[in-house]
Image: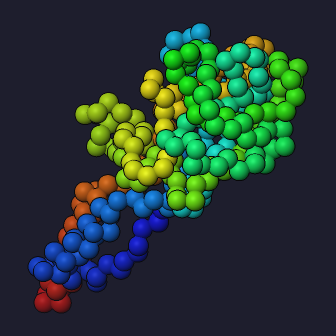
Amino acid sequence: MQTFPRFAFPAAGALTGSVMALTLGVAAAVFCAPVAANAGVTWTSQLEYRDGLVGPQTPYGTVTLEEVDANNVKVTVTLAHALSLFVNTGGPHDPFVFNTISANVVTMLAPTNAAFSDGGHGSFYMAGFGQPSVAFTDKIAKSGGNGQSNGKAGPIVFNVYNAAGITFAGVGATFCQAADVVPLGCSLGQLLTLGTGEHFKSTSEGWWFAADIYDGVTGQTYNVAAKDAFTPFAVVPEPATWAMKIVGFAGMGGMLRRRRAQGALA
């Protein structure tokens, strides 16, 4: 996670007049600064939609994306049930697919699990999630044939690399803060707008990721997909909250100093 510069508070009672104004100005500069690109930010997206069902279900799996450095995003795909498998049931079904804005300039480094491999760039359709009019740009393939009997256990772990730089949501992407939840109807940490530069993207229908799985709970195979992305970075207090805290600390310091002065005169 991103860490903020640390600063020392002045002694109790010293935050008066221009000193208080200067301290608040420094605090605002520190806490209002935008999130730097590739600062160790991690995003998660739940595979909670199922082909043939309406609305989100209990998640079938989770996609975690860690911005490792300026050129790499580490992707980890895990399934929720220990017996669930990644499969390829033929037709518009693939073990895992996703999108980048310029698929031809990114490289998928070999997954750490030997059962999976870079499936290349192209147009990959997933039944139930926009097929045949909406396609994903990037694919992770698996070894073996089709069907449940040839399914592979996860997780799928791989890096998406771009020499010119890559983030998950783009430089300057915005996400839902505490003050946005009610007026915007969003969830805390939810991605709101994409930034600039090379990054992942959703399809025109809003699907970020999709996978073909054998579900260890139901014993069935189907496509599942993710439609939202979240970052825990949003739990960091907002600038206004920090400003109020600093003012409160300053007030407490002033009160303590006045009490000491009154005690000395008594």
Using the image, determine if residue 220 lies above or below residue 13. above
39 relative position to 15: left or right: right
Identify which residue, 261 or 225, lies in the foreground. 225
68 relative position to 154: left or right: left
Tell me the quadrant of the picture where the C terminus can be found: bottom left
On the image, which quarter does residue 92 sit in?
A: top right
Give x and y (percent) for residue 28.
Answer: 25, 66
Question: What residue is drawn where x is 75% and y is 48%?
Answer: 110
Question: What residue is drawn where x is 77% and y is 24%?
Answer: 87
Give x and y (percent) for residue 37.
Answer: 45, 59
Question: What residue is drawn where x is 41% and y is 73%?
Answer: 5
On the image, which quarter does residue 153 sit in?
A: top right
**Residue projecting furthest to the bottom:** 264
Using the image, determine if residue 123 lies above or below residue 166. above
Give x and y (percent) for residue 265.
Answer: 13, 90
Using the image, determine if residue 192 lies above or below residue 218. below
On the image, which quarter does residue 163 sit in?
A: bottom right
207 relative position to 114: left or right: left
Give x and y (percent) for residue 230.
Answer: 48, 41
Using the image, determine if residue 5 lies above or below residue 89. below
Whether residue 243 is visible to the viewer of this picture, yes or no, is yes
In this picture the colour scheme is: rainbow
Whether residue 227 is visible to the viewer of this picture, yes or no, is no
Question: What residue is drawn where x is 87% and y is 28%?
Answer: 144
Q: How many discs mark residues in the rendered view?
A: 0
Identify which residue, 251 or 142, lies in the foreground. 142
